[in-house]
Image: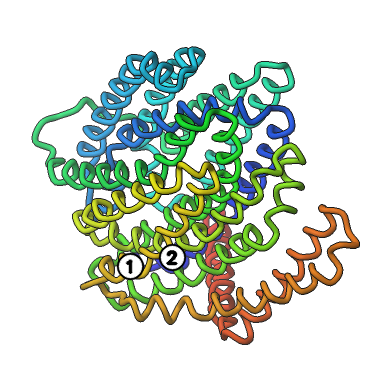
Amino acid sequence: MKDLKEKTIHGGLARLAAQAANFVLRLGSLTVLARLLGPKEFGLVGMVTAFTGVLDLFRDFGLSAATIQRKRVTDEQISTLFWVNLLVGALLGILAVAMAPAIAAFYHEPCLVAVTMVLGAGFLFNAAGVQHAAILQREMRFTALAVINTTSLVAGIAIAMLGAIAGYGYWALVAMTVTSPVIATTGFWMATRWVPKIPQKGTGIHSMMRFGGILTLNSLLSYLAYNLDKVLLGRFWGANALGIYGRAYQLVNIPTANLNSAAGEVVFSALSRLQDDPCRLRRYFLKGYSLVLAMTLPVTVACMLFAHDVIRVLLGPKWNGAADILRLLAPTILIFGIINPIGWLMTSLGLVVRSLKVALCFAPLITAGYLVGVPYGPKGVALAFSAVMVLCAIPLSAFCLRGTPVSLQDILLTSAGPLASAIVAGMLAFGVRTAYGYLLSPIPRLALETSVFLAAFSMMLLFVAGQKSLYLDLLRGLMKRSSSGEEETLVSV
C-alpha cells in the first residue's frame, strides 16, 4: 500500500476527531444523566453489565481482529466468520436470559432479572455487524466508521435522556445500551453493502479461529481483571457505593476507551500492513505512541490534581464522594496509555499467545489487589487497582516487547518528553490554582487550571521536548492527502 502513511494520518485524524466528539457526547450525557438519575440507578445497571460484559467479549470471538490482521482474506472466509459470529451472538443472548435469575439472586435485587434479559438482546445485534465493521477497518475507511459510531451514540444518548426525563429510571440506561448497537450494525451494513454468502466448508478459517480464540481468551482475562472490582463492591457494599465508584471509573474510562477505539483501530490496521517491514513498523509505532501519550497525559493530570472541581462541574454536588475515588484512579489513565499501544503492536504481529501469557500473569495480581482493598470500600479498591497497575507496567512492557522491532528503551525514550512536559505543566497549573483558585467558583476555576495546563503542556511538548517536527509532519501528511483527494475529484469530473 503505497499511500499507507497518508491513509494512516488521514484516517487517524478522522477517527480522533470523531472520538473527540464522542468524548464530548459521553461526558455531556454523563453530566446530564447524573443530575436526572441517582447512584442507585447507575449501580443497578452496573451490576448487570459487570456480568453481561463478560459474555460480550465472546460475540466477536476475536474474529474481527483476525479479518483485519491477515495479509490476505477471501470473501468466502469473511462470510463463514459472519455466520460464526451470528451463531455465537444468538447463544450469548440465550445464555444471558438463563443467567438472569442467578444474577438477581447474587445481588439480592429482583428487578435485575428483567434488566438482564433485555440487555441480552444486544448480543445478536452486535454480532450481526462485527464482520462488516472489520471490512471497513481493513479498508481503512475510518471516516465511515466514525460517522456510524457517532450517530449510534447520539441516538442512544437521546433515548436515555428522554427516558430519564419521563421517569423511567434505570430503564433509560438499559434503553441506551440496547439502541446503540442496533443503529451501528444497520450503518455498517449500509456502508459496506456487503451481503454474506452461505457458509462453506474448506475455506481455511481454522488459523483465523485459533487466532480469534486466543485473543478472546486474553480479552476475557483482561475483562475479569478490570471489572471484578465492580462485582465485589456491588456484592459487599451495595448499589449506592457501586454507583459512586462506577461514575468515577467511567470518567477515567471514557478517555481511555475513546483513545483505544480511535488510535487502536488505525494503528492496528496500519501495523498489520507493515508486518514484513520492521524498520518502518518501528517508526510508525513510536510516532503513534508519542501521540497517544500526549493525549492521555492532560486527562491524567486533570483527574489527579483537579478531581473535586471535575466532579462538581460534571456530576454535581450529590456526587462529591466520587472525587477522592477519581483522584486515586487517575494513574490508571496513564498506565493504559502506556500499555494499550503495546497490545496493538503484539496483535498486529500475531503475538496473541504472548498476550495471553501476560493476561494469565496480570489477572491474579489485580484480583489480589481488589481482595486487599475491598474491606476498605470504594477508596480501598481504587487505591489497590492503581497500585498494581503502576507496579506492573514496566516489567510487563519489557516482556511484551521482547523480540519485536520496538524495545523497552524506545518506549522509555519516547515517553520521557511528554511525561516531563506534563509534570512541569501540572506544577504550574496547580500553582495558579493555589494562588487564585479560591477566588473563583468551580466552573471558572476548572477552566482556568485546565487552560493553564494545556497551554504550558503544549509549549513544553513542542519546543522544549522537541516534538514540533512530529506534528508538522502529521499536518503535511494530512494536507498532502487532502490535495490528492481534490486532484482525483477534478480528474474524475
* Residue 467, percent from left and from top: 56, 81
Q: Quadrant of residue 87?
A: top left
Q: Nearer the viewer, residue 459 or 371?
A: 371
Query: Which residue lies under the disc numbered 1?
Result: 397
Q: Is residue 361 above or below residue 125?
A: below
Q: Secondary structure at mark 2?
A: helix
* Residue 427, percent from left and from top: 68, 75
Q: Residue furthest front?
A: 375
Q: Nearer the viewer, residue 250 or 122?
A: 250
* Residue 209, percent from left and from top: 18, 41
Query: Which residue lies under the disc numbered 2?
Result: 338
Q: Residue at x 35, y 47 (%)?
A: 367
Q: Is residue 180 toward the left or the right of residue 26 in the image?
A: left
Image mark for residue 451: none
Q: Amino acid at mark 1?
A: Ser
Q: Amino acid at mark 2?
A: Ile
Q: CA distance from mark 1 to mark 2?
A: 9 Å
Q: Secondary structure at mark 1?
A: helix
